[in-house]
Image (spheres, rainbow, N blue to C red):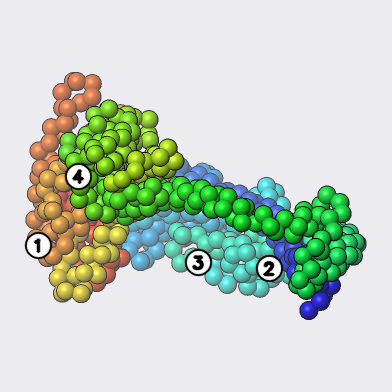
């Protein structure tokens, strides 16, 4: 291939191919940017619609708590089982209290219904008699679908559709009709306009409802903006391309002329004419290359000088290697690599590294490279000096030479965490050897600190900061692991869910600082009562849990009772010094098998048992059925 063809290929590879790639990526980025802007706006407005839905439900909750549950006529009718009077009073409340719909469900049967059937976003409350008997589940809404979609349209400009299954309850886009909408982020065309639809479902609708709310934001104009952006980018890239072609042609012609002169001179040299001189016109790189051709007689001297430069480059590479490995987290492997690098780089015969043991008082040898025969005494001496003085030390005994460097933490303290040393017989260490060794020793100190930091972060990532128990993430991992192990070996796994009774009143009465003390004391009881193989954890808030491997339902229940009794016996000092407080706990107990078959079912069974304990009087343990 000729030089001209190579230049053409080079131009294609470094100019045309990258420009094509840049054009492709730029076009994609423009499209993604415009679509992203459109999606971001629609998503933000959709979040407003969801927030409005939640606010309507919160308002309904306030109405239940402050109006309906305190209405003496309504509550009295429910307690006496007078449905007609309760229904009549509910219709009066719908008319007079700004309520759209009231529904009372007992079990799976709706026993009372009043108000607009298109009402949405109900609040739910369990209703009990004065004697604690369940009267049913009360559902109350303060907004109907038509009013809700009108408010969303007014606040966000989005069209909104509310459906109960396939039935449209309300819509601000009549042309849509009964067409299905994509659930999240899909596009649809209605009346010749393009819309992006985003939907959400009501997790707790009225009984019998399957409510789905969809918002549609127009995406008109996005394609035009993408096209305009691409045209602008294409024009700019075309201009750069034309400039590159002109520059390439000029450079190609100049290079061909200069290469031609070099080729002529090289052919004369190949024929034995050493008087041939390479033309050195100008002051550019080609002129410098011509001068190098003319100085070939001095090349040997240059090569000797380059050998020294090569050694310096090797040492620099070693220093960079030390910096690279300082972030690794395998302490012993790093120390061995650093000692071996120091021994090789400084031309030593042997080396070793000592690190402070976990007890904080003694040193342990963690790495040794080479043969210490004949060097042991001088190495021990220089290591002692370095540890005592806290600075690099060097010593010689006869023909034996050694240097040592103390390892300090890099977190601002002066604590010495170890020492690294190397030794050799014969010539003493040079200043370059000492510089290399001291730099590597500094990297060793950083590597040890990185390991300690990594271990601390790993421990904290699975521990609840307040109680010192495992956190929810560690609990989930332990539960899944123990259930899998139980299935593999045919053993049972128990679970205790524990909730502190009246904990909110402790915080409200004595403050959150007192609540934290209560949680820590309960966590201490949980740790002391659990076996070493158990997994006590903070499940969330004032709710704690214990995974009990290899234990059947009855054994798990006995553990729960021991924990509950010890908690009830606690007398916790008050933060204000005015006596002590006590607290009780309710426990739900389940096991795999027999009460559940997998992790999710086990949690659900234990949670149901805990709810039963709470509902039937608290301060008790209940087995899952």
Element class at badge 1: helix
Q: Is the N terminus in the top left, top right, bottom left or bottom right quadrant?
A: bottom right
Task: State whether residue 205 appears in this view.
Answer: yes
Q: CA distance from mark 3 to mark 4?
A: 82 Å
User: Which of disc 3 and disc 2 is earlier in sequence?
Assistant: 2
| Residue highlighted by disc 1 | 554
- Cα separation, mark 2 vs mark 3, equals 23 Å
Dot placed on the residue nearer the N-terminal end, 1 or 3 = 3
Give the residue displayed 28% in from the left and 64% down from the top.
Answer: 480
What x and y, as percent, mark residue 468?
A: 25, 42
Q: Are marks 1 and 2 in contact (CB under 8 Å)?
A: no
Residue located beneath label 4 in the image: 376
Q: Check residue 210 in the rendering and tell me which mark sits there, or answer none.
A: 3
Residue under numbered circle 2: 187
Give coordinates of residue 167: x percent, y percent.
59, 70
Dot placed on the residue nearer the N-terminal end, 1 or 2: 2
């Amino acid at each position: 291939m000729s030089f001209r063809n190579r230049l053409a290929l080079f131009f294609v590879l470094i100019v045309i191919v990258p420009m094509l790639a840049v054009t492709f990526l730029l076009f994609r980025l423009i499209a993604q940017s415009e679509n992203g802007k459109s999606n971001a706006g629609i998503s933000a407005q959709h979040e407003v619609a969801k927030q409005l839905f939640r606010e309507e439900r919160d308002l309904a909750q306030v109405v239940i708590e402050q109006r309906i549950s305190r209405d003496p006529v309504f509550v009295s009718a429910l307690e006496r089982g007078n449905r007609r009077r309760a229904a009549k009073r509910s219709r009066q409340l719908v008319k007079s209290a700004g309520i759209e719909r009231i529904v009372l469900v007992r079990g799976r049967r709706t026993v009372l219904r009043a108000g607009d059937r298109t009402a949405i976003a109900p609040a739910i409350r369990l209703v009990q008699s004065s004697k604690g008997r369940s009267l049913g589940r009360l559902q109350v809404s303060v907004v109907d679908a038509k009013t809700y979609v009108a408010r969303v349209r007014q606040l966000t400009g989005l069209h909104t559709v509310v459906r109960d299954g396939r039935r449209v309850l309300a819509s601000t886009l009549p042309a849509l009709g009964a067409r299905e909408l994509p659930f999240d982020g899909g596009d649809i065309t209605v009346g010749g306009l393009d819309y992006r639809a985003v939907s959400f479902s009501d997790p707790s609708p009225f009984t019998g409802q399957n409510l789905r709310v969809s918002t549609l934001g127009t995406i008109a104009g996005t394609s035009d903006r993408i096209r305009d952006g691409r045209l602008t980018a294409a024009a700019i890239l075309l201009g750069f391309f034309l400039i590159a072609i002109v520059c390439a042609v000029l450079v190609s012609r100049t290079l061909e002329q200069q290469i031609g002169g070099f080729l002529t001179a090289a052919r004369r040299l190949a024929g034995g004419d050493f008087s041939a001189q390479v033309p050195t016109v100008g002051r550019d790189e080609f002129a410098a290359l011509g001068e190098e051709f003319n100085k070939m007689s001095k090349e040997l001297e240059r090569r000797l000088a380059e050998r020294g430069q090569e050694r310096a480059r090797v040492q620099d590479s070693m220093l960079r290697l030390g910096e690279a490995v300082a972030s690794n987290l395998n302490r012993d492997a790093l120390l061995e690599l650093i000692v071996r690098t120091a021994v090789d780089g400084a031309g030593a015969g042997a080396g070793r590294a000592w690190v402070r043991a976990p007890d904080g008082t003694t040193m342990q040898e963690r790495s040794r490279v080479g043969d210490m025969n004949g060097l042991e005494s001088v190495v021990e001496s220089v290591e002692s000096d370095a540890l005592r003085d806290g600075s690099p030390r060097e010593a010689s005994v006869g023909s034996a030479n050694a240097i040592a460097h103390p390892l300090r933490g890099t977190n601002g303290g002066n604590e010495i965490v170890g020492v690294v040393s190397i030794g050799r017989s014969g010539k003493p260490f040079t200043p370059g050897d000492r510089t290399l060794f001291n730099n590597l020793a500094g990297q060793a100190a950083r590597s040890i600190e990185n390991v300690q930091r990594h271990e601390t972060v790993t421990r904290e990532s699975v521990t609840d900061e307040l109680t010192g128990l495992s956190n929810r993430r560690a609990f989930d991992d332990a539960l899944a692991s123990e259930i899998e192990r139980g299935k593999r070996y045919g053993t049972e796994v128990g679970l205790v869910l524990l909730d502190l009774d009246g904990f909110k009143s402790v915080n409200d009465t004595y403050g959150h600082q007192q609540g934290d003390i209560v949680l820590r004391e309960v966590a201490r009881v949980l740790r002391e009562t659990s076996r070493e193989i158990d997994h006590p954890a903070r499940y969330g808030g004032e709710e704690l849990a214990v995974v009990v491997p290899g234990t059947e339902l009855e054994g798990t229940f006995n553990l729960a009772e021991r924990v509950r009794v010890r908690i009830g016996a606690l007398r916790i000092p008050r933060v204000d010094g005015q006596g002590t407080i006590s607290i009780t706990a309710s426990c739900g107990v389940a096991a795999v098998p027999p009460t559940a078959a997998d992790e999710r079912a086990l949690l659900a069974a234990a949670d149901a048992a805990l709810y039963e304990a709470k509902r039937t009087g608290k301060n008790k343990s209940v087995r899952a059925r």
